[in-house]
Image: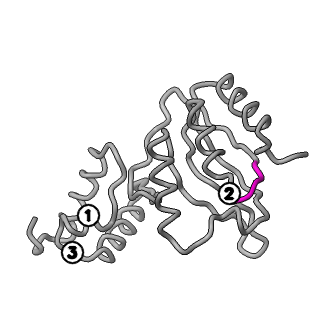
Amino acid sequence: MSNKMDPVERRRAILSLLQDAEEPMTGNRLAEQFSVTRQVIVQDIALLRAKNHNIIATPRGYLLAEAAQGREQYTLACQHGQERVEEELRTIVSLGAKVIDVTVDHPLYGELKGMLMLKNQEDVSQFLDTIKGKESSLLCTLTEGVHFHNIEVINESAYRRIKAALQEEGFLLKD
């Protein structure tokens, strides 16, 4: 696409691409496609969000939040070290859940949330590969391993199976 594209037209095109995308799209990929910088894409995304488009940023790129048709959301309270993140996430997705996010209650900043949107083992692998390439810490390291996951499942029975598996493995926060 031409680098002379009108910004409004570019934002419309970005939204269209996100609507059609089956996987998250990185800011770098969008920047390359529209011959602009990644910072221009970040600004475009911010402007689209300001117009009430529910675009979320995940470690794998941008995507439009999808409606949870026929699925229910639950919150899991977990506690473990960084070394068990892979095992925890793989357990959750292997039992059919989508891990929407991770949240911690920080003593200074309050609630901090990271969007994950992990629905299968491949998503978990990509997320873990991203962690290895960064010099930053997971949110759970800020709170002695205490964190929450919002998950999406087909029904309450699936949620109970996941909760039982996490309890058995020692991932759930103890009362």
Q: Provide the residue designation for mark 1.
A: 30
Mark 3, residue position:
36
Q: Which residues are magenta?
A: 78-82
What is the basis of the colouring in this image? one colour
Quadrant where the N terminus sits is: bottom left
Q: Position of residue 156 (x, y in %)?
A: 68, 25
- Percent x, y for residue 109? 71, 73
Helix, strand or loop at disc 1?
helix
Q: Label 3 is placed on what type of residue? A: Val
| Amino acid residing under circle 2 | Glu
* Relative to 157, 1 lies left or right: left
Are discs 3 and 2 less than 8 Å apart at CB? no
Label 3, label 1: how far apart the Cα atoms are: 8 Å
| Residue at 35% in and 47% down | 23
10 Å crowding of disc 1: few (<14), some (14-19), many (20+): many
Q: Earlier in the sequence, mark 3 or mark 1?
A: 1
Quadrant of the image occupied by residue 35: bottom left
In terms of sequence position, does the residue under pointer 2 or pointer 1 come before the other? 1
Q: Element under label 2?
A: helix
The question of residue 80 being in magenta is answered with yes
Q: Label 2 crowding class (10 Å Cα cut-off): few <14, some 14-19, many 20+?
A: few
Q: Residue furthest right?
A: 175
The residue drawn where x is 52% and y is 26% is 70
**Which residue position is annotated with label 2?**
83
Q: Secondary structure at mark 3?
A: loop
Residue 9 versus residue 122 in the image, above or below: below
Q: Quadrant of the C terminus?
A: top right
Q: Residue at x 44, y 43 (%)?
A: 122
